[in-house]
Image (cartoon, rainbow, N blue to C red):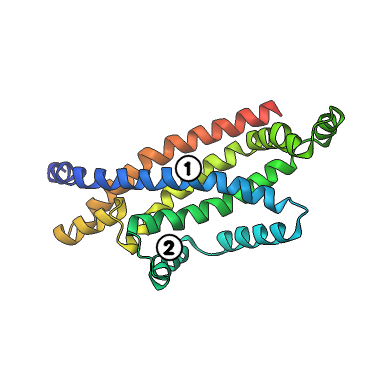
Amino acid sequence: MISTFRFWADSFPKLFGGLIVSLGLTALSLLIGLPLGLLLAVGVSSRFKPLNWLSIALVEIGRGAPALVVLYVVYFGLPALNWSPTAFLCAVIGLTFTTAAYAGEYLRGGLRSVNAGTIEAGQALALTNVDVLRFIIIPQGLRVSIPSLMGLAIQIFQATSLTYSITVSELTANAYSISNQTFRALETFALAGLMYAVITIPASWVTRQAERRMSLGQ
């Protein structure tokens, strides 16, 4: 047991560095993906057919394709287009696409849940369709979607472990590296799992609390 704790102490700095990379990937994917998801949600609800079809296609592809496949397509596909971004940037692009697709579906549900009477009240006040969307539908739809989006953030954080396959030095990749060097895979991944849990368990609790508050509010 003492040797295990000593091994964990020696391995912690490298694993912690990987955890920071994982958190950075998550933050960037959400920062870019959530606004894109809102645009997709509006596009899916649009009556302008070309925009509607394009938005539906992007949402369905993003939700239907496994995140690992998306990462491979970005990592190996962009160099074929004469652009060779870093592995980290490829990971951000791939996870952002997945985030936007799922967020688009969650937000679409949120926007459609807005009470028709509220929308009619806004129209009765002579608000334009754009103003109704900006000041009534989107704010209320976002509020309804918050628990789902928080759950999505946890899923994206967990999905960052897939980026080791395109050589990003995140938490799982660093765990693989340590286990290959020391042949102590069980202890290495046990510590990595604990580090993931330190992030995901409190985040899951906050998500459940948000869902409970939303249900009480409704």
Question: Residue at position x 25%, y 43% from top?
Answer: 16
In this rendering, the answer to whether 69 lies above or below 33 is below
Amino acid identity at mark 2: Leu
- The residue most toward the bottom is 80
Question: Residue at position x 16%, y 43% from top?
Answer: 1
Rounded to the nearest whole Å, what is the CA distance between mark 2 and mark 1?
18 Å
Residue 54, percent from left and from top: 66, 61
Question: Residue at position x 67%, y 31% from top?
Answer: 215
Residue 153's label in the rendered image is none
From the viewer's perspective, tell me whether residue 188 is left or right of residue 34.
Answer: left
The residue closer to the viewer here, 159 or 205, is 159
Quarter of the image with the C terminus is: top right
In this rendering, the answer to whether 70 lies above or below 197 is below
Between marks 2 and 1 in the image, the one whose residue lies nearer the viewer:
1
Please count the marks in the image: 2
Q: Quadrant location of residue 112? A: top right
Q: Secondary structure at mark 1?
A: helix
Amino acid identity at mark 1: Leu
| Pointer 2 or 1: first along the chain | 1
In this rendering, the answer to whether 215 lies above or below 83 is above
The residue closer to the viewer here, 58 or 180, is 58
Residue 71's label in the rendered image is 2
Residue 141, percent from left and from top: 68, 37
Residue that badge 1 annotates = 31
Question: Residue at position x 50%, y 32% from top?
Answer: 206
Q: Quadrant location of residue 58? A: bottom right
Q: Secondary structure at mark 2?
A: helix
Q: Residues within 10 Å of mark 1 (few under 14, many from 20)?
A: few
